Image (tube, rainbow, N blue to C red):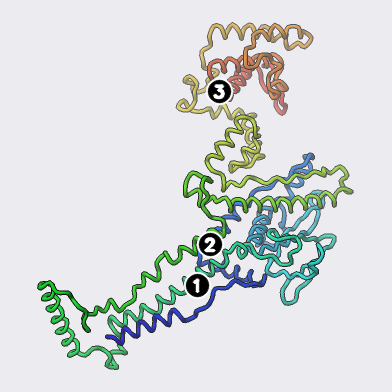
Amino acid sequence: MSEYSDYIWKARLNALLRGRKDVKVATDFHAQVDQINCINKNDVSALMVTMINFMVASGNVEYRFETGNAKFNKILSTWKASINKDINPDIPRGLRSVTEQYLRERWNSSLVVLNIQWGMVGGYEVPINLWFNDGGQITIKGQQSRLGGYEYFLGRDNPKKIVTTKNKTFMVRKPFESLYTEYPTPYLTKRGATYHALVKQCILEKQSDLIHSIVPHILLAKVGSDKMGQSGEYPTEQELIDLKEEVRKMTQQYNDATSQGKNIGAFPHDVDLENLIPDLTKFITSEILNPSDKNILSALGLIELEGFSKSRQETILNPKVLVEEVVEAVLDWREMLNEISLEIVERNKKRHPKIDKDIKVIPGIIKSFLTNDDKVLIRSAFDRGTIGHQDFIEILPFDFETTLQRRIYERDNDVNNILYPHIIMNQEATPDANKTPEETKEETPEKKKTEKDIDASTNEIEDFTKLDRVQSVKEYVQAPYDTIDDLPDNVKNVLPVGAQVIWLNAFNSAIDDGKSEASARKIAWGAVKKKYKKVKDKDKWVKK
């Protein structure tokens, strides 16, 4: 049996030594990019590609271009959606796809080369195609001694110079290096993620080698093989009988020793085959890989920061270092788009002298990093009027322009009343099946008297030659709007004076009854609709 044991341990040693190599990170830029690309194709670390994809998805926010010219805004919106539309069927159109490629190149090679092809859209010269070169295929030549002394070539073996023409320009960024640096160090290499991913890959390869080499030999030691049997290497029948007798004697000696209180000593045959077989769990335990995993997570910025969030899970998923890098990437891309915007203005100022020179590039919010506390704070800011409807809606997964058009349609088609909440949801008295609450609520004598007096007055108020009567009507108005002069513009600008008084009185009455502002507005408009109607295709109201 000792021959089997020797065989197993020799195989184990060979497995450890076979293919042994030191883990080294390349020092040349192109070789570093090749290492990263190799990891990306088969990420045995199960961490790097997953986290880079998460960073890309988080940083790929919507960008808006805003100017003081409504027509130009529309042109820019059309342009943004049509970028790269005529390149190839496998190239997605739109700025969002370009943004994704920027983020991937930033965190892959960290040598960002953007190509810009100019053309006409709606009478304006704008970039019709935008694409990035593979940073690992860029060759740099020139002098480091002066700023701007480098020239850029596409290809490694037979590089071709990248040049600027009238219709084609390019931009180069090295986001993690100084301006005078020739070749950047890729982000993953610079942060140490590449090295620790290679370490983990080496460990996994060793574990695989051990499993594939030792397990078959363990089975041979257990049961042998046909070839061994044919060559006579199996224990013979007599050897098995002798072994059985030897085990019986060893068992008897063990029982005698324990019954007499004697110590049990080791002797040549008290050896179990299991003791000769290595314990493989020691080689595949997670404790071996945990340090590498922790180092990779640390390199990517996934580290725990006390006080950054309230729960351990959120701390791991939203680490401050990773968040800051994604935010920086969003802002850097905005700066590149700003430069493109300035070039758009420069190329169109002769053709369009009145073009707005101030084009604002506004990135959207990074929704992946919003915590519940952030959302509550944003809602509170919206309720207090600190942020506008557009900002609030775009934080949600909705498009502002689409939402705005839908709300206009709902207002013009009385959808609010048609889809009034069911009785189990609204706070009004039980409504009639065919009427809104303001039409079914019983009116008090005081309210009837007030509306009667107001109706008697509005006939004269609508005659704008009798403005002296307005003051007497104002006496009926209660807080929060003291007079019709205090009404919102969207009320004053569309309603005649009499309708304004009805709106104001109904609104104040609803507020006094404890209704919310939104409910009070609905009631006020409902009161106006009883005596006035909206002129079709015009934002004006007339008496029925």
Q: Residue at x 54, y 50 (%)?
A: 318
Residue type at mark 1 is Cys
Q: In the picture, residue 468 is in which quadrant? A: top right
Picture coordinates of residue 53 (x, y %)? Answer: 57, 58
Label 3 close to label 2 by CB (< 8 Å): no
Badge 1 element? helix
Count of numbered labels shown in the rendering: 3
Circle 2 crowding by C-alpha within 10 Å: few under 14, some 14–19, many from 20: many
Which residue, given by chain and number where applicable, does mark 2 sit on?
Answer: 296
Cα–Cα span, label 3 and label 2: 53 Å
For marks 2 and 1 on the same chain, the one whose residue lies earlier in the sequence: 1
User: Which mark identifies residue 534?
Assistant: none
Decide: few, some or many residues near mark 1? Use Cα within 10 Å; few <14, some 14-19, many ≥20: some
Q: Is residue 209 above or below residue 194?
A: below
Residue, far bottom: 231
Q: Which residue is mark 3?
A: 516
Residue 487 higher or lower than 317, as above or below? above
Nearer the N terminus, badge 3 or badge 2?
A: 2
Q: Residues within 10 Å of mark 3 (few under 14, many from 20)?
A: few
